């Protein structure tokens, strides 16, 4: 599909404008040239809306319209990373001025059929409300520590009933993959980062599934020993729901316990057995 169609307004309105302008001119000349012909307000370039970071934006056009998503805020050969269709709801991540246009870096919402992140011209987007927070965002809503009874807090932080090495969920590899978890968490732009799953892969690699404070989910591939991730891609909400099957836990790095209701979560301190250093909090959801 040509860039003139996929990255900008369809050229048809300009052709209509030229035809109407010619008609108005002929009509004016026919009555002596003194008449002032009103030009309809819809003729000309549509005023692009502005969006704040975190707001929703809907792609303009019919459902069969395809719009290019680009790796940079400009039309250039080879920088198309995906395509979206008219009516799709996206989240705005960033804005940039390029020439006469404002471009927006957008990403798909959890549960989208296809996941992508990239740049779309602002005049191809319209303001739209985002849906209610998804489960990961609700879980990340803090509960003031002062509102949590001491007895409930102590009960929720009881000692782990089974050693990590004997678990049947992904946490059995938590200690071994902790350097990989640290490396992936360091890349996140919206802390705190919640680890949804850490899995050892072949050839010394690990895959870390994470959620950030904005409710976005990420798939990070990195060496088990840590370092710089080899891949860091967004994920759809369907992955989150699959990972929650089997009552799998969450993990948060650091000494500060996640501010969540202890009546619905069981918390476990994770200690490095080699030096006694606290690595973070492993926690299981106990409420339905």
Image (cartoon, helix red, strand yellow):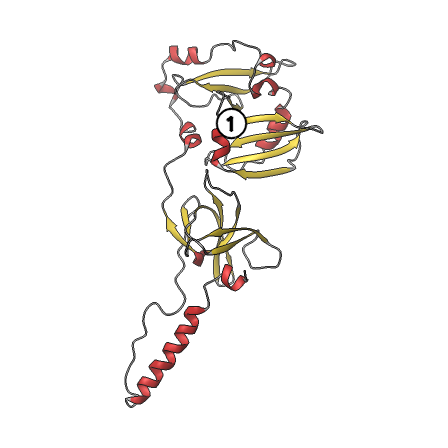
Q: Which residue is tagged 1?
A: 243
On the question of residue 285 being in view, the answer is yes
Residue 178 in the image: state x and y as whole percent. 61, 23
Front-lying residue, 102 or 67 = 67
Looking at the picture, does residue 83 appear above or below residue 267? Answer: below
> Which quarter of the rendering shows the C terminus?
top left
Question: Which residue ends up furthest to the right in the rendered image?
Answer: 203
Residue 280 in the image: state x and y as whole percent. 54, 21
> Which quarter of the rendering shows the N terminus?
bottom right
Question: Which residue ends up furthest to the front in the rendered image?
Answer: 64
Residue at 49% from the left image edge and 21% from the top image edge:
246
Looking at the picture, does residue 200 appear above or below residue 218? Answer: above
On the question of residue 212 being in view, the answer is no
Q: Residues within 10 Å of mark 1 (few under 14, many from 20)?
A: some
Residue at 49% from the left image edge and 31% from the top image edge:
240
Residue at 46% from the left image edge and 68% from the top image edge:
11
Q: Secondary structure at mark 1?
A: helix
Question: Which residue ends up furthest to the bottom in the rendered image?
Answer: 32
- Asked whether, in this view, residue 277 is left or right of residue 55, the answer is right
Q: Quadrant of residue 224?
A: top right
Residue at 27% from the left image edge and 84% from the top image edge:
35
Residue 23 in the image: state x and y as whole percent. 35, 81
């Amino acid at each position: 599909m040509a860039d003139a169609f996929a990255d900008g307004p369809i050229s048809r309105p300009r052709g209509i404008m030229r035809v109407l302008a010619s008609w108005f001119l002929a009509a004016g000349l026919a009555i002596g040239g003194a008449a002032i012909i009103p030009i309809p307000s819809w003729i000309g370039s549509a005023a692009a809306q502005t969006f704040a970071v975190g707001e929703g934006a809907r792609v303009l056009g019919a459902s069969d319209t395809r719009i290019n998503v680009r790796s940079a805020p400009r039309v250039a050969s080879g920088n198309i990373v995906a395509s979206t269709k008219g009516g799709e709801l996206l989240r705005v991540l960033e804005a940039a001025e390029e020439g006469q246009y404002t471009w927006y870096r957008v990403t798909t919402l959890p549960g989208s059929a296809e996941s992508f992140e990239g740049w779309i011209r602002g005049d191809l987007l319209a303001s739209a409300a985002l849906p209610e927070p998804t489960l990961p965002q609700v879980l990340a809503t803090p509960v003031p520590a002062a509102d949590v009874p001491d007895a409930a807090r102590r009960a929720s932080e009881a000692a782990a009933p089974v050693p990590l090495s004997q678990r049947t969920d992904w946490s059995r590899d938590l200690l071994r993959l902790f350097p990989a978890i640290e490396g992936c968490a360091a890349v996140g732009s919206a802390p705190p980062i919640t680890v949804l799953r850490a899995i050892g892969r072949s050839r010394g690699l690990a895959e870390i599934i994470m959620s950030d404070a904005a409710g976005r989910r990420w798939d990070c591939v990195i060496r088990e020993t840590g370092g710089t991730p080899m891949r860091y891609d967004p994920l759809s909400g369907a992955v989150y729901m699959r990972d929650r099957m089997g009552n799998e836990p969450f993990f948060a790095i650091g000494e500060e316990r996640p501010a969540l209701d202890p009546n619905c979560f069981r918390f476990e301190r994770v200690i490095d057995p080699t030096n006694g250093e606290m690595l973070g909090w492993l926690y299981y959801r106990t409420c339905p």
